[in-house]
Amino acid sequence: MRKAVLVTGASSGVGLALCKRLLEEDHELHLCLACRNRSKAEAVRAALLASHPLAEVSIVQVDVSDLQSVFRASQELRQRFQRLDYVYLNAGIMPNPQLNIKALFSGLFSRKVIHMFSTAEGLLTQEDQITADGLQEVFETNVFGHFILIQELAPLLCHSDSPSQLIWTSSRNARKSNFCLEDIQHSRGQEPYSSSKYAVDLLSVAVNRNFNSRGLYSSVVCPGTMVTNMTCGILPPFVWTLLMPIIWLLRFFANAFTLTPYNGTEALREGVRAGEEQREEGQRIRSGFRADSREPDVGLELTHREIAA
């Protein structure tokens, strides 16, 4: 039976590179491209099938910044699939990024220069806006739309006898200092992207605590620092040309510089392998509980807590 994989944001960047890698590793997948722009998705589908004719590639149109679109897509997916083995929650935005020139030059002459380039901490601000749903656009796109999607797809994901896995695309830019429960949508801040990615990290923990027992496991993965359609908007093209030799040099000192989306997808695939180990351990623990009705020993309890976290 074909494994069914759903990838949001599959028409460009990391999402597109991930689809190519997935089919290279298993050309008999049923790969579903969850994209906002249907015409771009159709072009991607045609290219993928040309390279991997044995694969099954389908499309579902969804805009995770529009809750009605998420509900419609979820209903369509429930009608088309009996289960989903893997869901890559990859779609995301960083609207109107602005580079803090003062912070850039200050960081260039400090001991934190590698950290600054690999995380963009303090370098980028964004101008957020309100969606038709009355939510901050970055929060709705990067966090809330995917959260609703998971809830709606629970019947396809929660099978204790054959677990499924969520893989969130997080970021090295996710900073606890930019996240606040009192302003969960970061409406009063200037770094909503960083805040939203930290919220994704927290949400993955919550998913594991609430869904592991139902056969759903969650991982967050950072694909590294890359040049994509998202990052290209931060600086003019000629500046990127000048920076690339420096970034290549920094690769010798920090493994975060993956540079290309395809290289970044290796981390996403490692996230799957780590999740499979997590699932096997979780199943072993549940089998232990069923085999022995007594209270678990401390070691077993600690392992269970580690998995839930």
Image: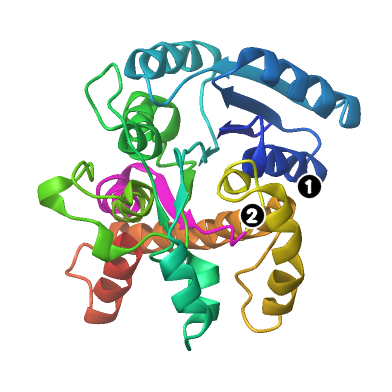
> Please, what secondary structure does the residue beneath circle 1 have?
helix
Q: Position of residue 189 (x, y in %)?
A: 23, 50
Q: Nearer the viewer, residue 125 or 115?
A: 125
- Residue type, label 2: Arg
**Residue 59 vertical placement versus 259 (above, below):** above
Tell me which label, 2 or 1, sits earlier in the chain. Answer: 1
Magenta span contains residue 234: no
Q: Mark 2 near mark 1, Cβ–Cβ under 8 Å?
A: yes
Scheme of colours in the image: rainbow
Instruction: Classify 10 Å Cα crowding around label 2: few (below 14), some (14-19), many (20 and above).
Output: some
Say the numbered circle drawn on residue 172: none
Q: Which residues are magenta?
A: 203-225
Q: Quadrant of the N terminus?
A: top right
Can residue 1 be seen here? The reply is no
Q: Nearer the viewer, residue 38 or 158?
A: 38
Instruction: Classify 10 Å Cα crowding around label 1: few (below 14), some (14-19), many (20 and above).
Output: few
> Please, what secondary structure does the residue beneath circle 2 have?
helix
Q: Position of residue 3 (x, y in %)?
A: 65, 34
Can residue 150 be seen here? The reply is yes
Image side of residue 96 versus residue 49, left or right: left
Disc 1 target residue: 25
**Cα gap from disc 2 to disc 1, whole angstroms:** 10 Å
Magenta span contains residue 214: yes
Say the numbered circle drawn on residue 269: 2
Quarter residue 251 falls in: bottom right
Quarter residue 30 falls in: top right
Q: Position of residue 273 (x, y in %)?
A: 60, 59
Instruction: Residue at 71%, 73% (x, y): give it.
Output: 246
Q: Nearer the viewer, residue 271 or 29?
A: 271
